[in-house]
Amino acid sequence: HPDDDVISMGGLLRKLVENGNRVTVAYQTSGNIAVFDHEVRRYLDLMRRASHVIELGGAEVVEGVMASVEEQLGAKEPGDVDPPVVQDLKRIIRESEASAAIEALGLSADNARFLDLPFYRTGMVRKNPISEADIEIVAELLEELRPSMVFAAGDLSDPHGTHRMCLEAVERALARYSGDPPLIWYYRGAWVEWGVSEATVLVPLSEHEMRAKVQAIFRHESQKDSAPFPGADPREFWQRVVDRNRETADLLASLGLPAYRAMEAYVTMRCGDRVEAQEIPTASLGEEGG
């Protein structure tokens, strides 16, 4: 989903950028079902007001388009699938937020790739199975970028199983990848964190880095306050992140290890085998890689 990157690995993402890595953030799904209708109405109102300041095709044209979308929103019953135009508007909202979020970490909108995998495009919570079309889209991106490192959601506790399906698409695409097997970093964060005994790599964050990560999460405005699918945890996503990253650091400090403000946890693997931290060249985080 758009926002999993900054929620789960915002700290490391910022470090990768600062160390001069070539970074591409690929969003497998649009996340459009997690946008409230009132968010669409807010942006429609912005466009309506903007039409009096900048040229958007004329006020009458804009009003006509707005009225059509508003009529479709108003005709919806609870549980109805959004009309295609509303699905597209919600997708665009998520894409805009995702671009703004990675910009807060030093990337540009050009570093974002929105794959919009077909399995997700049902307009409903229930998705289609992963198909050859989904795998091929991911495989083509891998062949284009030739990454040395791939970061993927290992957090399989999301409420609707989307993370699990996205991971399936990544792993099946990697199975046919023609390049050298990349190092896979599995992250968690939105729903549950890796335990310190599970993690192979722990990335320390300063207070400044933690604040930057939270600011990036804030850019996902449609997911703040009360997100459509928050799960059983009543805290906002940014609050969960702060608590979990600090709990990891505090636990390690209590075990006699160096004290840090926060820590992100990862499991690293290559070709299905765990790769321990000492096997990962530190310089690889500063070299050009995907």
Image (cartoon, grey):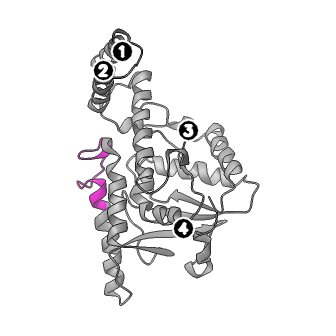
Could you give the CA–CA distance between mark 3 and mark 2, rounded to whole angstroms? 31 Å
Q: Is residue 235 magenta?
A: yes
Q: Nearer the viewer, mark 4 or mark 3?
A: 4
The residue stretch that appears in magenta: 223-240
* Number of numbered discs: 4
Kind of residue indicated by mark 3: Leu
Q: Nearer the viewer, mark 1 or mark 3?
A: 1
Kind of residue indicated by mark 1: Val
Q: Which residue is mark 3?
A: 117
Kindly indicate whether the residue at mark 2 contacts the one at mark 1 (C-beta within 8 angstroms). yes
Q: Is residue 88 above or below residue 256?
A: above
**Dot 4 or dot 3, earlier in sequence:** 4
Kind of residue indicated by mark 4: Asn
Kindly indicate whether the residue at mark 3 contacts the one at mark 1 (C-beta within 8 angstroms). no
State the mark number for residue 62: 1
**Dot 4 or dot 2, earlier in sequence:** 4
Kindly indicate whether the residue at mark 2 contacts the one at mark 3 (C-beta within 8 angstroms). no
Residue at position x 70%, y 48% from top? 144
Kindly indicate whether the residue at mark 3 contacts the one at mark 4 (C-beta within 8 angstroms). no
Tell me: 83 left or right of 286: left
